[in-house]
Image (cartoon, rainbow, N blue to C red):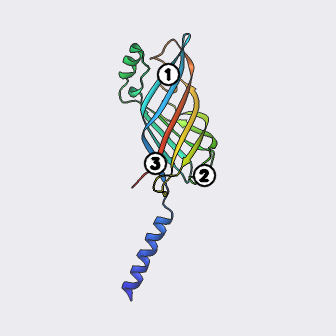
Amino acid sequence: MKTKYASLLLLAIAFSATTYAQEYYRTFSGDIVISLTNRDSTVMLVSHKLLVSLDYETSKISLKVPLETFRTGIDSFDTRLNGVRNMDLEFTGKLGITINSRRFDPQRYNMEGVITSATVPVSVRGNGSMTCIPAGDKLTPACTLLLSMETTLSALHLSDLFPTAKEEVRIDLRQSVLEKQTN
């Protein structure tokens, strides 16, 4: 009799643990672009090494990308960026929507968060959209996340690398497909 109760208790614990499990989605090679104005030219810093994590239940998002992975196509800037070791652009925030992965039209949102890689965390706001598509197995949809936010070179620790650039920059995260994270 004790064995039956113990088995039922373990089954109930296992069921409740799976019932409340959150669904995290992420991509390891998303695309990110930082656009800045240097003198009269627009310079685009591009990286394909973006890590995006998204909790579909709470709409919390985090981004991380090593600064040394950015490239501009301009040798002098790329050499400077390559020399920035062990520094990441990090962001944590929350999308202003409840994500519905079964909805296949664009889900537009506003977003607030903090760039946490700065010496003093810097608040930022942005906007974007998320579009989900049914996956081949019909069980785990993948979503495309588009996000834009504005901040400063100082907040990104890039002022020294681009001393003649304007302080304002724009960050765009483009078409990062988020797939269900397996634990």
- Please tell me which of labels 3 and 2 falls first in the chain: 2
**Amino acid residing under circle 3:** Glu
Tell me which residue sits at (54%, 10%) in the image: 39
Judge whether 15 appears above or below 166 on screen: below
For the residue labelled by badge 3, is the local secondary structure a helix, a strand or a loop? strand
Residue 76 quadrant: top left
The N terminus - image quarter: bottom left
- Please tell me which of labels 1 and 2 falls first in the chain: 1
Q: Which residue is mark 3?
A: 179
Asked if residue 41 lies left or right of residue 48, the reply is: right
**Amino acid residing under circle 1:** Met
Judge whether 99 appears above or below 153 on screen: below
Tell me where residue 63 appears, x and y as whole percent.
Answer: 48, 38
Tell me where residue 26 appears, x and y as whole percent.
Answer: 45, 45
Q: Which residue is mark 1?
A: 44
Asked if residue 123 lies left or right of residue 27, the reply is: right
Tell me where residue 55 appears, x and y as whole percent.
Answer: 51, 50
Foreground label between 3 and 2 = 2
For the residue labelled by badge 1, is the local secondary structure a helix, a strand or a loop? strand
Which numbered circle lies on residue 180? Answer: none
Q: Distance between the Cα atoms at labels 1 and 2?
A: 33 Å
Which numbered circle lies on residue 103? Answer: 2
